[in-house]
Amino acid sequence: MNFLTPTHDRCPLLPLLFVWVILSFPRAFQELKLVLLFFVILDFFLLAFVRRELAFSQKILFIYSFPISVGLVGALFGIYNGNSSQAVLDGLKLYLLWSVLVVLLLNYLIKFNALLIIHYSVILSAITNAAINIPLVFYAYGGTNFFPLWFEERMSLGVGFHEGYVHIVSHNIGMLLFIVPYLIATVWRTDGRQEMRWVVWVALAACLLLAALSGRRALWLVVLAVPYLLWILTLISGTKERVKSYTFLIVAIYGIPLAAIMLMFITISDHSILTRLITAFSSEDERSTQSVHLIDSFLRNPFFGSGFGGVSSYVREPESPWAYELSYHVILFNFGFFGAGLLIFALFYALFNAVRMIRRGIFKDQNGVFPIVLGSAGLLIANYSNPYFGTFDYLFVLGFLFMLGSLPRDKAGIAPRRSKRVWIS
């Protein structure tokens, strides 16, 4: 069936456009996103109250009940401890408002062929990302502007040329953390989507070049970690036979550290790329300093945390003293073992559902679960030192992982059983 053929008398162009805009322009063009969101919500309510076709997935509601609960508790403790009211409001927006909105959008998305929409959106976003940032580097090197000034400002575009490496500043570079692992898994596994294979290869090559030029250490580490993540997820799911070249995977796993060691002795200098990568783990790095202070503050109230707006003995931004880069340290500090435990449980519940789908095998029209899990792993790793999930765009993309267990069972190679959905009637 052609992708543009309406499913259940409905055309997938609106959700495709919405997901592509989220993946291609994170943290930018909010007006465009609001317009698209308006039409999505309008279509959502038409389904719910006019056509009476919309079902809320019980699993999605269950998973997001945890961040919503943690957000409410974090707000209560923040107010009780006299923390900044602005920080409490920001926290409620992140954990409550955005969670509710993501739940709505994910339930809307599963009314279509969600995996196919995500696949096409990732390909289009990969091409868009490369088309924006690769020319940016070469034109910046020549001292000219490639894009209009208004576009550069909205996307926060910029290029820094340093000794030994290039550093790209752009809102959408961060989405490569999801896109690159997704595309690698798609070409390396037989259960990746098979549509537009040659375009996938071109998009992957362009994104790998862009990742190398980006100067982003977190992105470099995620790209280097992809073979290991793919291998671990393959072992956990028991799907070794679905790896197209297992020998090449093993070579990559052992070849990456050997190549790094050789480069360390051959090219290391004060200004090499490898040196820049190594400094990310230095005790003198600002994030290492944040870690010490956040852990110390967490230990003062380890069970329920400080609530939203807690401030440690280290202040990074005087105008927002509660803001830090180490996302998982902040979760421990703000919510303690109680809140962190709930969030970890929700994540592992979603991973369990996804791995079970991969293990049981899925039909061709539902291929693409494995790449989404791998892409989500890339985001989760990078979020350690960069608060990507502090914005709606990245939270929505992470929601793809939480959506997987709610895909229609009769189309996922799993025996149909009674629906676990709460129907609107």
Image (cartoon, rainbow, N blue to C red):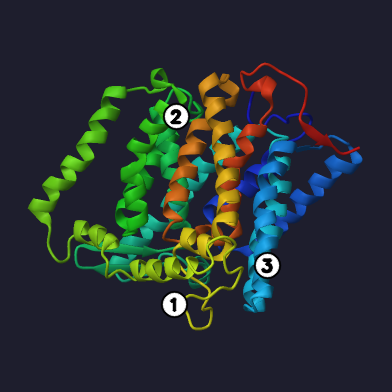
What is the number of the mark on residue 67?
none
Residue nearest the observer in this picture, 277 or 25: 277
Q: Measure how far apart labels 2 and 3 are at the Cα level.
A: 47 Å
Residue corresponding to mark 1: 316
Q: Exactly how many numbered labels are in the figure? A: 3
Q: Measure how far apart labels 1 and 3 are at the Cα level.
A: 22 Å
**Three-letter code for the amino acid on which mark 1 is drawn:** Arg
Residue corresponding to mark 3: 75
Residue at 26%, 23% (x, y): give it.
247
Residue nearest the observer in this picture, 330 or 221: 330
Residue nearest the observer in this picture, 224 or 96: 96
Q: Are marks 2 and 1 in contact (CB under 8 Å)?
A: no
Quadrant of the frame with the N terminus: top right
Residue 408 location, x and y as percent? 69, 27
> Of tags 1 and 3, which is closer to the observer?
3
Residue 31 can be seen in this image:
no
Which callout, 2 or 3, points at the residue further toward the start of the chain? 3
Q: In the visual, does 381 lie left or right of 97?
A: left
